[in-house]
Amino acid sequence: MIHTTSHDDGITVVRPSAERLTAVNATEFKKDVVALIDQDASQIIIDFENVSFLDSSGLGALVGVLKKIGHRGDLLVCGLNSDVLQMFRVCRMDRVFAIHKDVDAALRAIRERP
Amino acid sequence: MTSKTFHMVNQLEAVDTMVQTLRAEVDTFLSPETCFRFEICLSETLTNLAIHAKAKTSDVPVEIGLTIESKTASVEIFDPLGVQPFDLRNHAKDLAEVDTLAEGGRGLGLIMECADEVNYGPTGSRNRLSLIFRDQT
């Protein structure tokens, strides 16, 4: 369910392989990202550039990933299209997740963190 | 005015295809913002039915009626025969009250927040959820 790119400084960029994250695939997405965290990935950027739609199940999976990473690391999201961004806003998730324009912006932000 | 009827097998795997089909029907009639609200509501509604609505037979289809007139789309989703009535208006939680770290519990609240009108009740021998979406002026 995911494609990953690992950077030398320990940052992992995750791209969901499904264009639409819904109830039918959200659990698998969460499982795959949690597996990365269990393998010690602690700085994760989830790139939604190729995701055109996300429902509450997809959002719930993302929250589950956030809870898994907890205070041990960082989770940023980027590449949200207008519908996915609107979904974050309607569910007040724009107050919970650090949202960036694209992967480059997210990488800059995560590298600037103390 | 255009009216069409669709049928969906009441299984989770069938939901997203139906959602995309319905979205394509309204794309040229409604604004992008209204289409977003429409698509979210249909996804949440049909997912809820597929997961929670237990009919006496597993292959009872869901009937969906779509009417488009001017800048308004009206959707009727009929409960499959044998399914217990469920009025989501009595169960939906305000999205502002959902724990931000909750992994579930937003679906019904999303429907209430995104649809312009939500009604549920019997029509003939069936129960029906009615959702209306209008372009905001």
Image: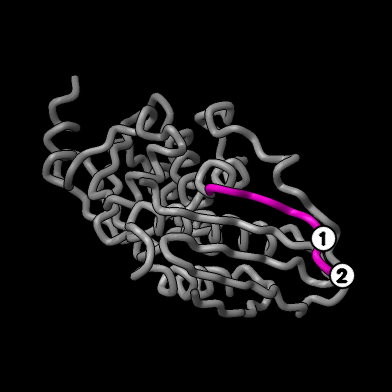
Q: Nearer the viewer, residue A88 or B32?
A: B32
Q: Is residue B44 left or right of residue A36?
A: right
Q: Nearer the viewer, residue B54 or B26?
A: B26
Q: Position of residue A66 (x, y in %)?
A: 43, 36
Assign a secondary structure to mark 1.
strand
Task: Give yes or no for residue B118 being in the magenta stretch.
Answer: yes
Q: Is residue B23 left or right of residue A97?
A: right
Extreme-top residue of the structure: A114
Assign a secondary structure to mark 2.
loop
The residue positioned 36% from the left and 40% from the top of the image is A40
- For the image shown, how many numbered marks are present on the structure? 2
Q: Quadrant of the C terminus of chain A?
A: top left
What is the magenta range? B116-125
Q: Amino acid at mark 2?
A: Ser
Residue A108, image quadrant: top left
Distance, label 2 to label 1, CA atoms, is 7 Å
Cβ–Cβ below 8 Å for labels 2 and 1? yes
Q: Is residue A99 left or right of residue A8?
A: right
Q: Is residue A46 left or right of residue B36?
A: left
Vertical placement of B9 versus A20: above or below?
Answer: below
Tell me, yes or no, if residue A31 can be seen here.
Answer: no
The residue that mark 1 highlights is B122
The residue that mark 2 highlights is B125
Q: Nearer the viewer, residue B75 or B51?
A: B75
Secondary structure mostly seen in the magenta stretch? strand
Q: Position of residue A36 (x, y in %)?
A: 38, 48
The residue positioned 41% from the left and 50% from the top of the image is A33
Q: Position of residue B61 (x, y in %)?
A: 72, 78
Q: Amino acid at mark 1?
A: Pro
The residue positioned 11% from the left and 44% from the top of the image is A104
Q: Nearer the viewer, residue B4 or B86?
A: B4
Q: Quadrant of the N terminus of chain A?
A: bottom left
